């Protein structure tokens, strides 16, 4: 393996979404960086991969990125995986990539699984121009972000947990209007995958009557 940092997407649901190339790289690199070694351990066991893992998550990445970049620069190869999806997309990855780029370390991101693309395409809303918002700030800056999005004409994509999905939909309706078209996808690529489409008002009613479960991607049409 070349001494570089590989960003390796992992399945957001179905393990069959793992690519042959991703399996090979995780198996062959000198060391593997994992957001949660327990979660990644299940993946490694499924594909019969035996490689040493190093914990790399949002609580320790500020302290470890320089040392990891130096190891790669010295001749080792490394792969970074998050619990699900593509590293760096609402998951750890950016800080390490930035450090590697600054040190002249080669970085390569494999194409692969991410939750928002299937949700966007399934939504039935315009896909030619969109803005990815990910998780909105929980408190500070949240209201101002909604105010900025009032004039957004591109399709908007958000991530949310089942515990806050109704709060997000309600706030979107308050700022954008309860008749704004939207789509909510949950459990993408899993057994109980579901997409519900309608106005924000209709989606609020749906998830008020049906207890939210799973991880959510919310897609909202832009201003006409």
Image (cartoon, grey):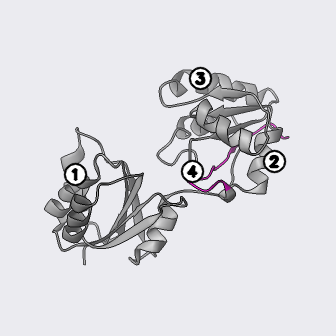
- Residue 37: give x, y in percent of width and height: 62, 31
- The residue closer to the viewer here, 16 or 100, is 16
Identify residue for label 3: 64
Along the polypeptide, which appears first: circle 3 or circle 4?
3
For label 1, the SS is helix
* Image quarter of residue 52: top right
**Of marks 4 and 2, which one's residue comes earlier in the chain?**
2
- Name which residue lies at 64% across and 58% down: 112
Q: Mark 2 sits on what residue?
A: 24
Q: Which mark is residue 167?
A: 1
Report the front residue among 133 and 49: 49
In the image, residue 166 lies at what x, y percent? 24, 54
Q: As displayed, is residue 198 above or below residue 33?
A: below
| Mark 4 lies on residue | 85
Graded by Cα atoms within 10 Å as few (under 14), some (14 to 19) or many (20 or more), the crowding at tag 3 reads some
Q: What secondary structure do most residues of the magenta stretch adopt?
A: loop
Instruction: Confirm whether residue 192 shows in the render.
Output: yes
> Relative to residue 152, is residue 54 depicted above or below?
above
């Amino acid at each position: 393996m070349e001494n570089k940092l590989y960003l390796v997407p992992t399945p957001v649901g179905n393990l069959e979404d793992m690519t042959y190339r991703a399996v090979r790289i995780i198996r062959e690199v000198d060391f593997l960086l994992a957001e949660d070694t327990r979660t990644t351990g299940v993946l490694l066991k499924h594909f019969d991969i035996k490689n040493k893992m190093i914990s790399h998550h949002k609580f320790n990445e500020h302290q470890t990125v320089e040392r990891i970049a130096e190891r790669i620069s010295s001749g080792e190869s490394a792969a970074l995986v998050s619990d699900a999806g593509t590293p760096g997309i609402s998951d750890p990855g950016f800080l390490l990539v930035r450090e590697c780029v600054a040190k002249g370390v080669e970085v390569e991101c494999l194409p692969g699984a991410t939750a928002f693309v299937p949700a966007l395409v399934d939504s039935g809303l315009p896909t030619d121009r969109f803005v990815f918002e990910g998780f909105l700030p929980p408190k500070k800056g949240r209201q101002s972000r909604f105010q900025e999005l009032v004039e957004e004409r591109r399709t908007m994509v958000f991530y949310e947990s089942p515990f806050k999905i109704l709060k997000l939909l309600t706030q979107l309706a308050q700022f954008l209007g309860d008749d704004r078209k939207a789509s909510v996808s949950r459990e993408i690529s899993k057994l109980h995958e579901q997409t519900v489409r309608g106005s924000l008002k209709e989606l609020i009613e749906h998830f008020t009557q049906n207890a939210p479960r799973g991880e959510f991607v919310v897609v909202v049409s832009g201003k006409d």
